[in-house]
Image (cartoon, helix red, strand yellow):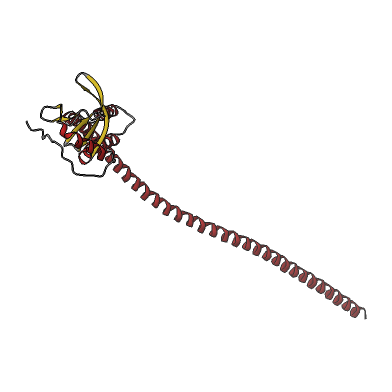
Amino acid sequence: MVRKGLSNAILSSLLLTSSFAMATSTNDVVSAVESKNNAGQASQQKIDQYSEQTEGMLAEYKAVLRQLDSMRIYNNQLDRMVSSQNSEVASLEKQINQIDQTAMEIVPLTLKMIDSLDQFVQLDLPFQLNEREKRIASLREMMDRADVTTSEKFRRVLEAYQIEEGFSRNIEAYKASMERDGDVKTYDFLRVGRTALFYQSPDGAETGMWNKQTNQWESLPEGYRDAVEQGLRIAKKQAPPALIELPVFTGEK
C-alpha cells in the first residue's frame, strides 16, 4: 500500500511538473508570438515609413527632373535670344558706321547746296531778297549747331530748295522799299513766276520792271500801267485771272 501511494504521489508530481512545464512552454510561445507580432508591426511601420519616404523622394526627384527640363528649355531659349541680340548689335554697329560715313559725305554736300542756293538767289530776280537771304543765313547758322542732327540739316536745306522751286509756279504781289532816283520809296511789286518782276508806285505814277539783260530796274512806258495794276489785283485775288499783256526780258544780251 505504501508503494502504491508513493507511486501515485510520484505520478502526481510528474503530472504537475509536466503540466507546469507545458504551461511555461505555452507562455513562452505566446510571448514569443506576441514579441514577433510586435516586431512585425514595428517592421511594417518602418517599411511604411520607408515607403512613404521613398515615394516622397521619388516625387521630389521627378519634380527636380521637370525643373531641369524647364531650365534646359529656358537656357536654350536664352541662347537663341542672346544670339539674336548679338546679331542685332552687330547690325546696329554696322548701321552706325554707315551713318557716320554717310554723315561725313552729307555734311560737305549740304554746305555746297547752301552755297549754290545763295548764288542762285543772287543771280535770280531780286524779289523778296530780305526774306530769302535771311533763310540762307539761318541755314548757315544751323550747320554749326551741335543740337541739330545731320538728317534735320539736310531736310531743312531741301525744304529751302522746295520753297525756291515753288516761286517758279505762281504769281505774287507784295510791298517793299526800293531806292529810286536817290530816294527810298515803298512800291507794289508783281512777280510772275521767275519770268518777270514789276514795280508800281501806290499812286500808279511810276511803273517799271527788272531788266535781266542789264540787271537793273527800268521804267516802263505809261501804256503798261494798267496791265501791271491789273496783274497786281489778280495776284492779290482782288480780280479773276485774265490774260494781260506785259513785257518780258529773256536775260539774253
- Left or right, 211 with respect to 96, comes to left
- Left or right, 221 with respect to 23, comes to left
Which of 15/79 is in front?
79
- Left or right, 226 with respect to 53, comes to left
Instruction: Report the label total.
Output: 0
Which of 164/179 is in front?
179
Which of 7/248 is in front?
248
The structure residue drawn at horizontal position 69% and vertical position 66%, both measured from the top left corner, is: 36
Which of 138/220 is in front?
220
- In the figure, 23 relative to 56: above or below? below
Say which quarter of the image contains residue 70: bottom left
Quarter that holds the N terminus = bottom right
Say which quarter of the image contains residue 227: top left
> Residue 252: percent from the left, percent from the top?
8, 33
Say which quarter of the image contains residue 69: bottom left
Residue 108 appearing in the image: no
> Residue 229: percent from the left, percent from the top?
23, 35
Residue 149 appearing in the image: yes
The structure residue drawn at horizontal position 63% and vertical position 60%, both measured from the top left corner, is: 49
> Residue 184: percent from the left, percent from the top?
24, 21
